[in-house]
Image: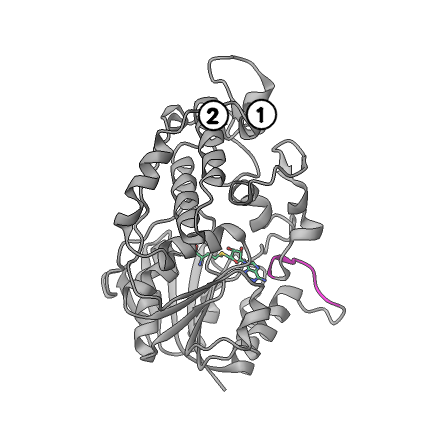
Amino acid sequence: MIQQSLFDADYPAAPPTEGIKYAGSKLRLLPQILWLAQKTGVKTVFDGFAGSTRVSQALAQCGYRVICNDKAVWSKVFGDCYLKAGSKKKYDQLISELNSCPPKDGWFTEFYGADASVKNQDIQLKRPWQIHNTRKLDGIREKIDQLELDPYSKAVALTSLIMALDKVDSTLGHFASYLRDWSPRSFKSMHLEVPNIICCDDVHRVTNEDVFAIAQHVEADLAYYDPPYGSNNEKMPPSRVRYLAYYHLWTTICLNDRPQLFGKVNRRLDSRDEVAGSVFEEFRRNEQGKFIAVEALHRLINNTNAKYIILSYSSGGRATAEELDRVMNDAGKILDVIELDYRRHVMADMTWSKEWLRNTQVPNKEFLFLLQKK
Ligand SMILES: C[S@@+](CC[C@H](N)C(=O)[O-])C[C@H]1O[C@@H](n2cnc3c(N)ncnc32)[C@H](O)[C@@H]1O
């Protein structure tokens, strides 16, 4: 049986969350994720691929204890800020001190800033920010280190800085290529604000691990898995989102380590695919002819110490629907499937578990599966 509904009409409204522009962010799916989590009646949720942390933020505000994990360093910074940093009021003075930092010409300006008034410069095509903003970045980033802040205050300062930079960039939402012409927002002057920290006692955990290092021991009733999808574009299989390569600049701002750079967009050397790729971004098959990414997902689901799993999947991803179905049925029972077609703005809640298989030939469909593990 398929119930169709107009987008979010039948789902609870999600609480407000904050985040950078992020490929694969589940902002639009928060009502459905919360609805599935609510069905299980669980209290603790492991968000294994937290990314922007929007899902963790929403779950925390709905009263769940959250274990927020991602192997990207910026995601840990966001998690520490939104889930661990305490009261928002505590940080007013810090953020106003950072806003009044004198701008300076420094390392970020040298490699990532350009002067919009200088016309016909090749360099302009390869820079994500205008120099009035990279100068501010240089001043503020130096100040953050000088202040020798405790880890949570530092996470608040860095999150606030990254959020402000994200609002004045000249990119398509990542740092793998920059826009040819300056975006209108890049002319604005960045301004830091205190992030919307979720004030709660010390109940949540934020980790910065490879998901395999933590899934087996995690003490959670439900795991939410939103791994990189890869791409099913057979002509260009490597054309998928590679998170460490796409967001290399957020790593550099968090670490302030002035890394060795390469390529047209000045990427960190350690964000090269050979060293920084995730097994979930792998587009090749193994010797048995199975997709490596799908086998990794299989291993992960089998090894997860939680009774329920909510899994995100896109019809544009590497895994074929049949392969995913095999993996899920091997690991447990599919209790619910929600399908979202962004182009038609229609949701379908399919209670008959095989129905979804027919709909995966259409691109741009997102699926959410609720699994009960064997
Ligand atoms: C689709 S995004 C998650 C988006 C997130 N749900 C949100 O709403 O912002 C996938 C995330 O998986 C992370 N990731 C990739 N491989 C990983 C691994 N082996 N362990 C932990 N995180 C990983 C990436 O850093 C990226 O943030």
> Can residue 341 be seen?
no
Residue at 43%, 51% (x, y): give it.
150
What range is drawn magenta here?
280-286
Residue with the most extreme bottom position? 374
> What is the secondary structure assignment of the residue under circle 1?
helix
Front-most of residues 371 and 190? 190
> What is the secondary structure assignment of the residue under circle 2?
helix
Q: Is residue 100 left or right of residue 229?
A: left
Residue at 55%, 77% (x, y): give it.
216
Q: Amino acid at mark 2?
A: Arg
Residue at 58%, 56% (x, y): give it.
230
Quarter of the image for residue 268 reads top right
Contact, CB < 8 Å: mark 1 with mark 2? no
Q: Is residue 283 magenta?
A: yes
Q: Which mark is residue 135?
A: 2
User: Which quadrant does the N terminus fall into?
Assistant: bottom left
Q: Which residue is mark 1?
A: 110
Q: Is residue 356 above or below residue 266?
A: below
